[in-house]
Amino acid sequence: MSAANAESPSEPDDGALALDILRASARLTARIGDLLSGLGLTQVMAGGLWAVTDEPTGTPMKRLAEVLACDRSNATLVAAKLEAAGLAERVTDPTDRRVRVLRLTPEGTAKRRELVSAIGAASGLNRLDDTGRRALAEALAQVLQTSTENAKDPSRTHPVH
């Protein structure tokens, strides 16, 4: 029984739901660690592959840093690891020569697809029907939006008395 179901099933406690999310995240993170080594990837490389669009235009380095929630120098290190593995290349944006973009190589695109598929299989989300998946996706989007808004305005996380 999950912590969220410890209370009335119709009105789960927010704290218990948050704990369930953390538990699910910890379990998935543990599974992913084993999965990544089987794919020949580190967590840093997997995060980079996940963050880079598979569009031919690539992802601007500034955007990569934003998606990875790190500074630009760390994004550069991620890009260097992906380049060294032959999974990506840094190129000049043809529409703005001041901008460097990280673009997946064909090997990187294939590895990204393999990564996404493997994580999806390891997640256990295949137990949900389409309605459950949509509901989970919508709920997570709302939670993530709220946490993003709260991160931008710390006063929102603590009530003013």
Image (cartoon, helix red, strand yellow):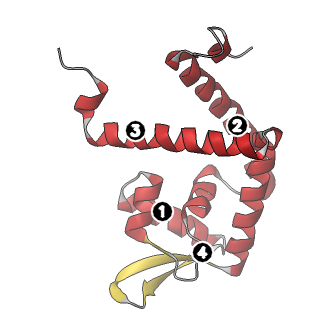
The residue tagged 2 is 28
In this view, 101 is above or below 75:
below
- Marks 1 and 3, the one that precedes in the sequence: 1
- Label 1 crowd (10 A; few <14 / some 14-19 / many >=20): some
Mark 3 is on which residue type? Thr
User: Which residue reaches farthest top?
Assistant: 7
The location of residue 40, given as percent across then percent down, is 75, 58
- Marks 4 and 3, the one that precedes in the sequence: 4
Q: Is residue 37 visible?
A: no
Q: Nearer the viewer, residue 6 or 38?
A: 6
The CA span between labels 1 and 3 is 30 Å
The location of residue 33, given as percent across then percent down, is 71, 43
> SS for tag 1?
helix
The residue tagged 1 is 77
The CA span between labels 1 and 2 is 25 Å
The location of residue 100, given as percent across then percent down, is 41, 79
> SS for tag 2?
helix
The CA span between labels 4 and 3 is 33 Å
- Marks 4 and 1, the one that precedes in the sequence: 1
Q: Nearer the viewer, residue 17 or 64?
A: 17
> SS for tag 3?
helix
The disc label shown at residue 146, or none: 3
Q: Quadrant of the C terminus?
A: top left
Mark 4 is on which residue type? Ala
- Marks 1 and 2, the one that precedes in the sequence: 2
Kindly identify the residue that appears in the image at 63 percent across and 33 percent down. Answer: 25
- Label 4 crowd (10 A; few <14 / some 14-19 / many >=20): many
The disc label shown at residue 88, or none: 4
